[in-house]
Image: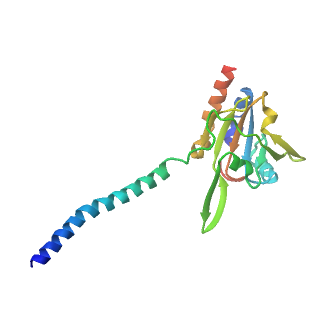
Amino acid sequence: MKQEWKHLVWLGLLNLVLVPSLSSVSQAQQKSQDKEKKEPAPMKLKVGDVAPDFTLLAFDGKDLKKVSLSDYKGKKNVVLAFFVFAFTGG
Amino acid sequence: MKAFQQNLAKLEGADTQVLGVSMDSPFSNFAFAQQTGVTFPILGDWGGPVTSQYGLTKKFDIQGVAMETARRATFLIDKSGKIIHEQVDDEAVDPTKTVEACQRQKLKN
């Protein structure tokens, strides 16, 4: 009888230690999942950074033309609009 | 892209060139531009080297098939080549903030 009582005490103590730590782990996981959902991944390039130069091709209906970011340096501002795929919304 | 077209006069009035970029071929982009009435160049970043240079490559899978695509993003780059404004993901659908930043830039120069 005494032995059983001891077991119960140990179980109770174990519960006190384990249960809160397990639930805090799951809370932390939930928090990090929420974070992923709400906050977009950080950007590699930030305001103030120099925009990396590139050369790409554009088709104007007749010819393929090379377009480089550096073509506009000292002449114009450039809006560079990356979008997902042609024929998608936006 | 339509939203940029609608704001093109304002942007060009602020001494700004609009360039679209997608990971399609230049030919698909031309067909897309014609269909949507876009008159500025849409560059073909075939295979995505520039998209990844700008840190915009996004990996995901559809029915277990791995895909790579671009995040939607708009950068405003000034005449010296510096990024002065950026919008990303859903926020980049509406270019109003970029247009406003462009107009502020015009006042500065």
Q: Is residue B13 above or below residue B86?
A: above
Which residue is depicted at the point 33% across and 57% down? A24
Q: Confirm whether residue B1 shows in the render.
A: no
Q: Is residue A46 left or right of residue B25?
A: left
Q: Position of residue B101 (x, y in %)?
A: 63, 29
x%, y% of residue B7? Answer: 69, 34
Of B32 and B103, which appears nearest the observer? B103
Q: Position of residue A90 (x, y in %)?
A: 65, 47
Rendering coords of residue B27 (x, y %): 82, 52
For residue B63, above or below residue B105: below
Q: Residue at x 46, y 50 (%)?
A: A35
Res B41 seen here: yes
Q: Residue at x 61, y 65 (%)?
A: B62
Between A14 and B21, the one lying in front of the other is A14
In which quadrant will I find the N terminus of chain A? bottom left
Nearer-the-camera pick, B91 or B51? B51
Colouring method of the image: rainbow
